[in-house]
Image (tube, grey):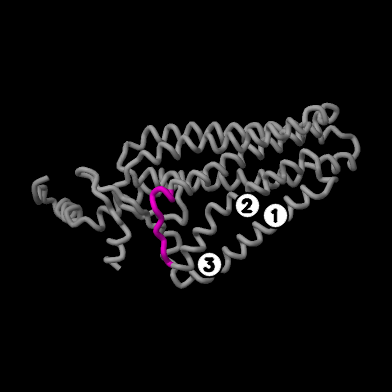
Amino acid sequence: MAARLVISLQVQEQGNQTSITEFILLGFGTLPDLHFFLFLLFLVIYIATTAGNILIMALVVNDQHLHTPMYFFLGNLSCLEICYTSTILPRMLANLLTEDRTISVSGCITQYYFFSSMLATECLLLSVMSYDRYLAIVKPLHYAASMNGKSCLQLAGGSWVGGFLASSITALLLSQFNFCGPNSIDHFFCDFIPLVKLSCNDPQLMEILAFTLTSVLSLAPFLLTLLSYVCIITTILRIPSTTGRQKAFSTCSSHLIVVSIYYGTLLIVYIVLSLIYTVLTPLVNPLIYSLRNKEVKEALRKGGSGNGESSGNL
C-alpha cells in the first residue's frame, strides 16, 4: 500500500520545491464493500438521466407544437444536464470499477472547469427561463415581440458563453498554481475549494476572485429569478377566475419546482459547509491536537498537577 502511494505521487523536482503531478480522489474509498453496489446505482442514474434528457431534446426538435421559447430553453437545459452529469459520473464510475482513483493535475483542473462552467450556465439559464415566464404571464401582449427567435438565441447563447467565460478565469488561475502536497482530495470529483487548499500558493486572491464571480453568477441570477416569480405570483393572484389562475400557474409550475430544488440544494450545501468550516473545524482542531500531540498532553498533565516548569525548549 505504501509503495502504491509513493508511485501515485509521481513528483517532479522544480528547484527546491516538489510539485505534484497527480491527485488521488478519495471519494468512496472508505466504503470498499459498497463499490460494486454504488457503481450499479450511479450507472442506472446516469443512464436514466441521459436517456430522459435526450428524449426531451428529441421531442422539442421533432414536434412542431413544442417550437416555442419555453420549450427551446427547456431543450437547452436538457442538453446542459447531460453535459453536467457527463463531467462527473463517467470518471466516478471508472474509479468505482477499477479502484484507480488517480487523476492528473491538468485533468483535475479540466474537470473543474467544465463542472463550474455548467454550474454557472445553469444559473444563468434558469434566470432566463424565469424571465420568459415573467413575460408570458405578466406582459402577455408583449411576449411574442420580446421572445422572438433572435431573442431566444441571444439569451440562450449568452447563458452558455457567460458561464464558460467566467469559469475560464478561475481555471486559468488554478492552472498557474503549484501543488506541493498532500495530493489527496476528499471528494469524488475535482472542486474549487479542495484544489485551492492543496496548493502551495497564497489562496487569498483566488478566494476573493472566486467569491466575486460566484456572487455575480449565482446571486444575481437568483435575485432575478426571485423577482420574476414575485411578479408572476402577484399577477396570478389578481386573476379573477380559479380556472385562469390554475392555467397561468401550470405554465410555470415545472420551472418553479426545478428552480426550488436547484437553489435549495445550493443553499443547503452552502450552509452545511459554512457550519463545518466555522463551527465544527474550530471545535475539533484543539481536540485533535490535544489527543494526538504528546507534548500538549504532557503540558496539560503538568498544568493540572500545578507544575509550571517547561518540559522542553520551543
Q: Which comes sooner in the sequence, label 2 or label 3?
A: 3
> CA separation, marks 1 and 3?
24 Å
> CA separation, marks 1 and 2?
8 Å
Residue under label 2, please give it: 82
Q: Which comes sooner in the sequence, label 1 or label 3?
A: 3
User: Which kind of residue does numbered mark 1 sit on?
Assistant: Ile
In this rendered view, identify the residue nearer to me: 80 or 301.
Answer: 80
| Crowd rating for badge 2 (residues with CA inside 10 Å; few <14, some 14–19, many 20+) | some
Q: Secondary structure at mark 1?
A: helix
Location of residue 310 with respect to 30 vertically, above or below? above
Residue 123 position, x and y percent, is 61, 39
Residue 191 position, x and y percent, is 46, 47
User: Which kind of residue does numbered mark 3 sit on?
Assistant: Leu
Residue under label 1, please give it: 54
Q: Nearer the viewer, mark 1 or mark 3?
A: 1
Q: Which residues are magenta?
A: 99-108
Instruction: Check residue 105 for magenta coloring.
Output: yes
Q: Quadrant of the C terminus?
A: top left
User: Which kind of residue does numbered mark 2 sit on?
Assistant: Ile
In this rendered view, identify the residue nearer to me: 23 or 291.
Answer: 23
Q: Quadrant of the N terminus?
A: bottom left
Say if mark 1 contacts mark 2, CB within 8 Å: yes
Location of residue 27 with respect to 71 vertically, above or below? below
Residue drawn at x 87%, y 34% as measured from the top left: 239
| Crowd rating for badge 3 (residues with CA inside 10 Å; few <14, some 14–19, many 20+) | some
Q: Secondary structure at mark 2?
A: helix
Q: Is residue 105 left or right of residue 290?
A: right
Q: Nearer the viewer, mark 2 or mark 3?
A: 2
Residue 38: give its label: 3
